[in-house]
Image (cartoon, rainbow, N blue to C red):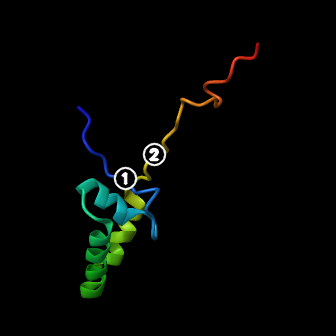
Amino acid sequence: MEGKKLYKSRSDVKIDGVCSGIAKYFNVDPTLVRLIWLAAVIVGGSGILAYIVCMIVIPREPDVVDYTGGGYNNPPNSN
């Protein structure tokens, strides 16, 4: 059984994709997560440290590879 995995987003990136990746994981709006990070930064400054740690620890979302086309893995017939 494979569960959900936390990744930094590749498509919805403002700084490094951390907030968008967390939003995808919890199925919430990325703007909400960004506002929570901003509040953490303003209130105590711990949001900056947490963001930097997340940038380092959370892996980048894997590339999606389409093997249905005629790429290197599926070359066209050369008759």
Please tell me whether mark 1 sits on a helix, a strand or a loop: loop
Give the percent coordinates (x, y) of residue 61: 43, 50
Please tell me whether mark 2 sits on a helix, a strand or a loop: loop
Looking at the rendered image, the quarter that the N terminus falls into is: top left
Give the percent coordinates (x, y) of residue 21: 35, 58
Q: Quadrant of residue 62?
A: top left
The residue singled out by tag 2 in the image is 62
The tag on residue 7 is 1
Amino acid bearing label 1: Tyr
Q: Residue at x 23, y 57 (%)?
A: 26
Q: Is residue 60 above or below residue 47?
A: above
- The 10 Å Cα crowd at callout 2, few under 14, some 14 to 19, many 20 or more, is few
Q: Residue at x 37, y 56 (%)?
A: 58
Give the percent coordinates (x, y) of residue 20: 36, 62
Amino acid bearing label 2: Pro
Q: Is residue 49 above or below residue 1?
A: below
Q: Quadrant of residue 29?
A: bottom left
